Image: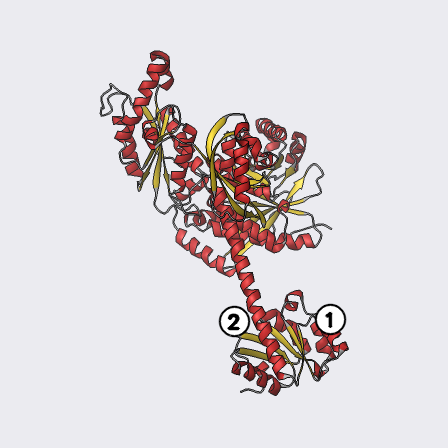
Amino acid sequence: MSRNLEDHAPGRIMSAQPPLLALLLLTADTAASERLVERLRATGLAARALVTARADRLNDLLARRAFDMILWWRHDGDQDLADAIRRRGEHAAEIPLIIIAADAPGREQVLEAQQFGARGLVALTDEEQLLWTIRREASDLRQRRRYRELAARLKQCERRSRELVDHTGAAIAYVQQGLHLYANSAYLALLGYPNLDEIQSIALLDLVDPEQRDGVRDLLQSAERAAHSDPVEITTRLQTRRGKGFEARLSAAQAVLDDEPCLQLILDPARQSESQAMTGDMASDIAAARTAFFEEIEARLAPDRAVPLPFAVFFIRLRRHSELLRDLGLTHGLDIVDDFGPILASVTAQAHAFTRISDDGFAMIVDGLDEKEAEALAEHIREHARLPQRLATSGRIAPDCDIGYYLVKGRAAAAQDILNAAHRLCVYSAAAPGDCAGGMQTPTSLAARTKQTAVDGDTEVADKIATALGNEQFKLVYQPIISLMGDNQENYSVLVRLLDEKGELLEAKDFIGAAIRRGLIEEIDKWAIRDAVRVLAEQRRAGHNLRFFINLAEDTFRNPSIILHICDCLRELDVRGNWLAFQFQEELVAENLASLGKLIEALKQIKCRVAINRFGATNRSEMILQALPVDFVVLMPDFARALAEDPVKQQRLMTIADLAREFNVKSVVTGVEDARALTVLWTAGVDYVQGNFLQRPSPTLDIQP
């Protein structure tokens, strides 16, 4: 055996799993340390040791290597080593320290050992006591590790359970002493509450029909009893926020939320039968049919909303619905519309889900279709789905329905957004059949258009991106967002750059398209979030009042796990949510309202700010502000270009700034390139400006003291 284990220890000591122990022996007596290790192994406790008596190496060793236990031969009398042990860091202080005294320890040595934070003080001559102390600490170490492992697993299970609750179609809430602690979006929608804050002040029994409150109260008390581990159920009548009553099955079971014991409630409203859904019976509950249809979509998606098998969602709308009711009378007109459901179902026999989705609309899912097959099916329906008493034709007579279909593949949006896309395409096909004949799918977002326009060189760029992600070759640059209204908050837009082989920074426009098409954009966004949060933590600790604006791509915000990544970064680096603003392009918002609604609600819960980027790019700006609780609108750079010479653009800018103020939203104008534009922007009441005229994007934060 080597006489100097410090010089010949093989490689870096990794964190050993019990029963193997990694020991740090602080002594100059290598012979004594070797005997101790041999005795431990002889008693069945395998150990590997590193021996040193150098005080100047202690902190470095503890920082670079993972030890399970520290044994210190105190009789060596090395004051430098004693000082080094006193100064060891918080993490190192958690490693059990056993002090080995030359003789039986006295009162002063016991007090000193307590000051050092030692877990044992043993005389060198009492070998059996020393071995017993080490075995005791080793056993305790295994128990602590097991506890930490189980606690981490529990936290992970709770986090995943919360994620499932947030994204399931079932209406789920958590209550404690009859008050709501949390409710998912399905629960809020079922009872008609716009957000969690509204329902947290409402007692559960206040939502129950007064005549049935005693039964529900007994149910809750029964579920709270320790002897009940299985859910208890009752059928009761509840009231929505607007006073509308409905029957539901209420299930209650014991649960834990944020380390607090509580009850988990599941509401299952009475739904129409499958046969009613197939025939489109007007007496059926269309809202429940939509919920069931959304569940059919969700069942085809992975937890990260990846699509294992592509499928198509069709929306079919009966033409002249209002004219039928007007000309034939209400009752006869409804009979004819009702009879159209079974006819349509027979024409679309290959559908895996078919339901009446509105008064004049039907929806269905067909698995495994490509674009040509979906187009062919749409044309088949147009030709053969006829109102009663009309014969199927080959297109010589105008069809009785309009059709829109949407192919779901790659990373899926929320089920509501998918159905909305199919409905929108149905409306387009009816309004402009020449542009969207037969309900043909058109790109519904910037990301979709990007994916459909692959270019040469994608493979080479994708390889660079993959290499850069693994070698820290992405860099963040920052461009200040300057307040025109005297805000003392230092706001910066965070932009991603890629280092090429020449060491130059490539702008996002040079690689973002390939990243989206090759499925790498999520990894870039996750890297950007973590690195931005790291820099933000450093700057905040230095006393700078910063906020970062970070863009999220469509594939990123469609993945429910992104909120978990954000929370992990904030918690790990001790950063507050209100120091960040996450941006979403307006061109993506309308097609992802449901997906973004859930994400923005989660971001608001952790106090993050929300911005709509490239605002004013569509004619839906007011609708977006009405639908989503945003904090900033970041206008397109085109608004600032040649602004001083363009009265029409100035008027449009003032209109948008006024619209933002109506919704209590701050406005940011980007692309400012000259001083004259600043005067116009200040006059228009714009809150913030950004552009190369003020400062170009820089790899360093230029923060004035």
Q: Position of residue 297 (x, y in %)?
A: 39, 39
Is residue 243 visible to the viewer in this orientation of the structure? yes
Give above or below for 561 relative to 672.
Answer: below
Is residue 525 visible to the viewer in this orientation of the structure? no
Give above or below for 3 relative to 347.
Answer: below
Q: Secondary structure at mark 2?
A: loop
Q: Position of residue 393 (x, y in %)?
A: 22, 24
Nearer to the camera, 478 or 584: 584
Q: Secondary structure at mark 1?
A: helix
Q: Amino acid at mark 2?
A: Pro
Q: CA distance from mark 2 to mark 1?
A: 29 Å
Q: Residue at x 55, y 68 (%)?
A: 142
Which numbered marker is on residue 115?
Answer: 1
The part of the image, by quadrant, that contains residue 291 is: top left
157 to the left or right of 608: left
Pointer 2: what residue?
18
Classify 10 Å Cα crowding around label 2: few (below 14), some (14-19), many (20 and above).
some
Nearer to the camera, 193 or 13: 193
Q: Residue at x 37, y 26 (%)?
A: 361
Q: Position of residue 684 (x, y in %)?
A: 65, 30
344 to the left or right of 160: left
Classify 10 Å Cα crowding around label 1: few (below 14), some (14-19), many (20 and above).
few
Q: Amino acid at mark 1?
A: Gln
Give above or below for 493 relative to 531.
Answer: above
The reply to whether discs 2 and 1 touch (Cβ–Cβ < 8 Å) is: no
Q: Residue at x 63, y 80 (%)?
A: 129
Farthest-out residue, right:
108
Q: Position of residue 73 (x, y in %)?
A: 67, 81
337 to the left or right of 582: left
Give above or below for 343 relative to 455.
Answer: above
Q: Residue at x 53, y 76 (%)?
A: 11
